[in-house]
Image (cartoon, rainbow, N blue to C red):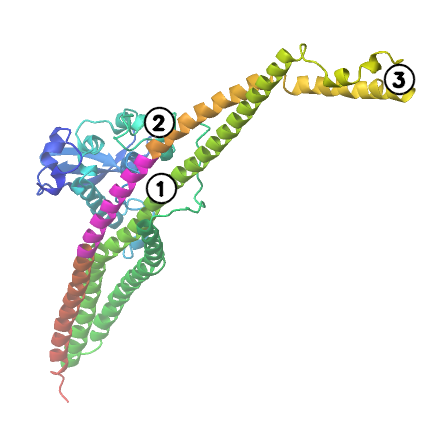
Amino acid sequence: MTNRDSLKPSCGCVIDRLLRHDETYIFITGAHKQSDSLSGKGYIAYNLRIGDIETKRRYSEFESFRKAMKSLYPALIIPPIPEKHSLVDYAALQIKVKDDLATIEKRKRMLQTFLNRIAKHPKLGKDHVFHQFLETNITWSDVLHSPPLNNLPKDPLKMVLSEDVQIPTHTFNPLLASNLIPAPSAAYQLKKPDPRFEESEKFTFRIANYMSNNLDKSQRKVIRRLGELANDYAELGAVYNGFSLNESGAVANAIEKIGQAVDAGYTETGQMVTSLEGEFAEPIQEHAQFAQIIKQTLKFRHMKHAQVELIENVLDHKKDQLASLQNIENEARRLEQALTRNKTIGPNAVDVDELNNPEEDYSPRSTPSPQRKSLNGGPMRVISAVGHTLQNIIDVNPEATRRNQIGMANDAINVLEEALNITTKDLDVISTELQADLDRFQREKIQEMRDMLIAYAKIHIRYCQKNLESWQEARAEVDKIPI
């Protein structure tokens, strides 16, 4: 079984059948300028070919395709495409304009690499959205406005990824969008972080900063200066050739040969710049982009883990709240039962004090004092009435309110438990897929770094050999000058 026959089931379309063969390669065979029929603006269309199937896609369609794949698979490492403007920086020997030939050639190479990285991915390569991107006579805007892409939520945390929960995946899920579900922030500190991904985050952040701020920047600077050096060689060669016209005989021949060696230096330096761009600088730039992509993918996993922990916290709080309400309800019932018993036996009860002091029945009744009257009525009675009125305003039926709160708490707990089940399984799926992708990327990166360094060495060896040959010929001509 090949790498392309594993994991995701195949859709069986023509493109899918072509991609099942490991030797299948996607080519960008050309690029030409076209005009938009609506706006009239010009753009570059790239010719894609796989087997006998050809289609055309513009850069903005590559951009939207990559964005769609990232929305479908937020836990996977989606390969980068060349940045829209950064490629101009590489055109050291060309005029920096939008349709510059050198820029277009670089973009062709990098977009071709992007497509083939997608194709050989065990999951991305089998997605039918990818196949539609390569298919002839498919309008890409129609694909963007059709399932599954038009069902994707803006926030991937509100989408189910695990297929174990028997809920539609890769579509908006109202349960995860409930107001009960807390929204995590990037600054949230995990209570129980996974040591594997914690270490991966630290390593990736370090590599991303180093690649972007050091290696990629330095390589661009070297290429730019080599391009400037090539131009200086061109000027210097012309100067030597002109200088040789002022001399004669062996001296003129020697100076002319020096000029030719310098001209060869111009040609070989330009060739070296072109080779370094395609075989070293562009892969370095691509890996700098990869580091940022991995950083964002790890951030998504962090957010999903944070979502799980926050749901757990809210669920624990709701359970405590429910337990408190149930305790209050139980106490209220016991009190109600006690009051009911007292009302039942109260009218038939015999006062023991009355039995012990029968003479009190015949003693004259004492007249209540004015002070006692004022206490039993007047302001105190008004305060009691106001308090009773406020109680009625605040809660007319506390028993019904309490039972309603218990029902709402139970409903919330059911929602949170279901959400926790979904997000926990999603986190497991995300962790498994991301770890597999990180391992696969690391293996490929080691192989690619090896190839890049070998290419870097070979380019310099060839450059030195060609220059050595030119200067050896110049030395032989100089030796012919009589002393």
What residue type is disc 3 on? Pro
User: Which residue: 49% across, 28% down?
Assistant: 322
Left/right of residue 286 with respect to residue 27 in the rendered view: right
Q: Nearer the viewer, residue 28 or 313?
A: 313
Q: Badge 3: how crowded within 10 Å, few (<14), some, or many (20+)?
A: few
Which residue, given by chain and number where applicable, does mark 1 sit on?
A: 300
Choose top left, top right, bottom left or bottom right for residue 269.
Answer: bottom left
All told, the count of numbered labels is 3
* Mark in the foreground, 1 or 3: 3
* Mark in the foreground, 3 or 2: 3
Residue 440 is covered by the magenta coloring: yes
Name the secondary structure under disc 3: loop
Point out residue 27 in the picture as x, y percentages from the top left corner: 15, 42
Q: Badge 1: how crowded within 10 Å, few (<14), some, or many (20+)?
A: some
Point out residue 189 in the picture as x, y percentages from the top left corner: 44, 47
Which residue, given by chain and number where applicable, does mark 3 sit on?
A: 368
Pointer 3 or 2: first along the chain: 2
Give the alpha-carbon distance from disc 3 to disc 2, as whole Å.
Answer: 76 Å
Pointer 1 or 3: first along the chain: 1
Which residue, given by chain and number where applicable, does mark 2 sit on?
A: 172
Pointer 2 or 1: first along the chain: 2
Query: Which of the image's four quarters has the N terminus?
Result: top left
Point out residue 446 in the picture as x, y percentages from the top left corner: 20, 56
Q: Nearer the viewer, residue 457 or 427?
A: 427
Left/right of residue 30 with respect to residue 194 in the rendered view: left
What residue type is disc 2 on? Phe
**Residue 84 visible in the picture:** no
Magenta residues? 424-447
User: Which residue: 53% across, 26% down?
Assistant: 325
